[in-house]
Amino acid sequence: MEEILNLLKQLDYKDLIANHILTAAIGTITVYNINTKIQKYKIKKDYNKKTTILKPPKLVLNKDEVENNFDIEQLSEQIRDDLKIFITTIMNRREDFDYIAFLNNLKTLKIKSVNFDRINIIKKLLFKQDSKILGAYSSYNNLIELSKDYNKSVFFHELFHTASSVKTEQNTYIGFAQRPSSIGVGLNEGYTEYLTHKYFYEFEEVRDSCSYLLEQLIAKEIERLVGEKQMEEHYFNANLLGLITELEKYNSYKKIINFIKNLDFLCKYRVNNLVDEDMIINKLNSVSNFLLECKINKELKNNLKSILYTDKAEEIYCCIKYIRHEFSLFIENEEKAKLFENTIISLEALRAIYNYKKISGKTR
Ligand SMILES: [Zn+2]
């Protein structure tokens, strides 16, 4: 602990990343010093806090000539080339899409080279994590910080944050996350990393990256539900509320908010070993049930007249089996992982639910 405190003293707190780590460190040291009961209580309280999802402002292209301290010529050749690859790929992807947030942010974007060594040591000491921080984006300052040994995967991920951030006087909207409430961080990180893979899979550095694996998997399932174009549109417009409205076709508002919070919880606590595994398993279970419910309700909505419902039930069953299997890979305890994977509603039971809901016309 003393070693950590010494390292913390040496950080330059004006740095964005140093600030992040400081907050995390204070949180962690506090959690280590209180007993599990209080810790659980704190998490529960945090969880039950009422969260209002805000509607993002209408995006308007900023036509003012802003003084830009971002001079592309000043960047290293590597950064310049990668930035060009990103912009061309994004712009060519959808011709019907205007990327207003991105165009506005590009005008004032700052990119800075930062040394993350000390921070990475602290991270390792605190969280026993070997993964290194190689980049960060601050939507507040519209600033990307990159380590000297950054790779394309890191830079593109941060550029997706840049392309999906909108700031107002009181709030910041970053893709599917919102501040100051901090809701949606898990879904946002997962979808950001998933988009990085989807758009830039041709690059080895991207293929090799394994950040936010669980969050990616879940974000991908949500995209399957609402459709690729819709999901991307809401993301680039920083419109979490729009996505929620879309999901409300398949589940209740309350359950959707719970799902988003569960994913935030998993994103925040899973890798840092801060809570016991049963709490993680519990959240994984809730998320997988939420996805199952949405899938059933979507099928019911789309196929009310279809007589092939048994095939559909089988399809949903396979899907949910796959999700349980993939989720189980994130459970360290082998026995518990097996149990989690095998605790799956039987196909017969699923058919029964499907039939029941179909007959009673209940889609909610
Ligand atoms: Zn990120």
Image (spheres, rainbow, N blue to C red):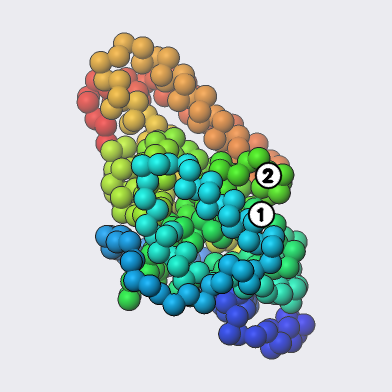
Label 1 CB-ligand 1 distance < 8 A: no
* Residue at 74% from the left image edge and 77% from the top image edge: 118
Q: Residues within 10 Å of mark 2 (few under 14, many from 20)?
A: few
Q: Is 67 drawn above or below residue 322 in the view shown?
A: below
* Residue at 30% from the left image edge and 50% from the top image edge: 242
Q: Which residue is farthest top?
A: 307
Q: Name the residue under label 2.
A: 203
Q: Is mark 2 on a helix, strand or loop?
A: loop
Front-most of 8 and 361? 8
Identify residue type, mark 1. Answer: Lys
Q: In which quarter of the image is residue 266?
A: bottom right
- Give the quadrant of the N terminus: bottom right
Q: Is 167 drawn above or below residue 305 in the view shown?
A: below
Does residue 242 appear to the left or right of 178 in the view shown? Answer: left
Q: What element carries label 1?
A: helix
Does residue 134 appear to the left or right of 27 in the view shown? Answer: right
Q: Name the residue under label 1.
A: 152
Question: What is the C-alpha distance between the residues marked 1 and 2?
Answer: 8 Å
The answer to the question of whether label 1 and label 2 lie on touching residues, with beta carbons closer than 8 A, is: yes
Q: Is 191 drawn above or below residue 45 in the view shown?
A: above
Q: Which mark is residue 293?
A: none
Whole-percent x and y of residue 54? 29, 62
* Residue at 47% from the left image edge and 21% from the top image edge: 315
Front-most of 43 and 252? 252
Q: Quadrant of residue 334?
A: top right
* Residue at 32% from the left image edge and 76% from the top image edge: 169
Does residue 87 appear to the left or right of 131 in the view shown? Answer: left
Whole-percent x and y of residue 193? 56, 50
Q: Which residue is farthest left?
A: 361
Q: In the rendered image, is residue 279 in sight?
A: no
Q: Is 349 drawn above or below residue 201 in the view shown?
A: above
